[in-house]
Amino acid sequence: MPGSKILASAHYVPSDVVTNADLSKIMDTNDEWIQAHTGIQTRHISLKGDNTSDLATKAAKLALARAQVEPKDIDLIIVTTFTPDGLAPSTAALVQRNLKADNAWAYDIMTACAGFVFGVSTADKFIRSGIYKNALVIAAEVNSKMMDFSDRTSTVFFGDGAGAVVMTADNLGGTVVAEQMHTIGNADVVHSGRIAPITELSADNYPQIDAFAQVGRDVFDEVTELIPGHINDFLALNDLKPSDIDYFIPHQANLRLIEYIANALQEPIAKFSTNVIRNGNTSSAGIAIGFDELMNAVNLSGKKVLLTGFGAGFTYGSILLKL
């Protein structure tokens, strides 16, 4: 049956690196606490005024170049983001303009940190319809503009970044083997408004009444209760066990959650993407960045890769890829 194939991937992170020590200068925290609770050492922050569409465009251009596909040949652009440039136009429309991808229609998907998984799933369906041939899926976040930099309980987790994949029609069945998506309506554990991109780190300049906030313990409990079981059940439906998967790329919430999931599945942490250590939690972009890093680090030909996203909603799901 015709399917969709991932031709190429790429990612982009801002050049400004913010360390735990940098954060300790503007809020009551320290490197030891942050690493012990999150495993995060650094994060990239957009301090030059770049918005989400800017990061998305940069990742997209890199992915298109690697795929050797011209912008005019793209039929569909999906941007998954928790931090859009604005409510209208869509961030995807801005990317379409930036790329001069005049033959593509474009729209956003907002399923928070599960976004990239939902974006790949959606593009796969459009391609399988036979109407569209080439799609660009981009996960991009400027989380820093959402943060209250006086809030040590949330802000220390997050960074900015973008990842992208180019997908195309494939008569041999494609890359996407199986998927399973879920939403449990629960608006109580994560909340966010939106603010403009920042240009400096300052707890005085950026406290926001409507800034991002989360009940960290509730988030941890929800993920640890649901996600290992979800992965086991999903794989069982496809006659697979965790040991059959070559690489896992979960949402990069924090290293401790990834370690918990690995332990619950009884799989070595070496099989799991851990870019959160360097990039922080980049929301929907974390899985896209992890996929690109994996593509560049190892030969994935014939390998089974599981993408698992989970985030506000509570929304979660997995896609099984065979490269």
Image (cartoon, rainbow, N blue to C red):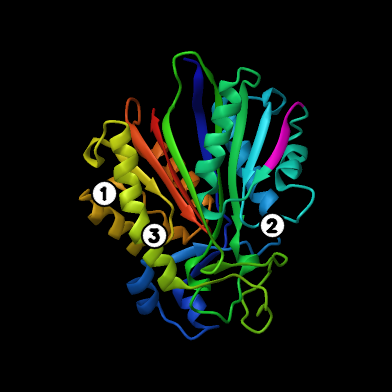
Mark 1 vs mark 2, CA separation in Å? 33 Å
Q: Secondary structure at mark 2?
A: loop
Magenta span main SS: strand
Residue 201 within the magenta-colored segment of the rendering: no
At x 61% / y 29%, what residue is drawn?
A: 135
**Residues packed near mark 3 inside 10 Å, few (<14), some (14 to 19) or many (20 plus):** many
Write the start and end of the magenta stretch as one range.
103-107
Residue indicated by mark 1: 270
Between 293 and 313, the one lying in front of the other is 313
Q: Earlier in the sequence, mark 3 or mark 2?
A: 2
Mark 3 vs mark 2, CA separation in Å? 31 Å
Residue indicated by mark 3: 223
Residue kind at label 2, given as amino acid type: Asp
Q: Is residue 91 above or below residue 49?
A: above
Residue indicated by mark 2: 50
Q: Is residue 164 visible?
A: no
Tell me if 106 is positioned left or right of 12 in this view.
Answer: right
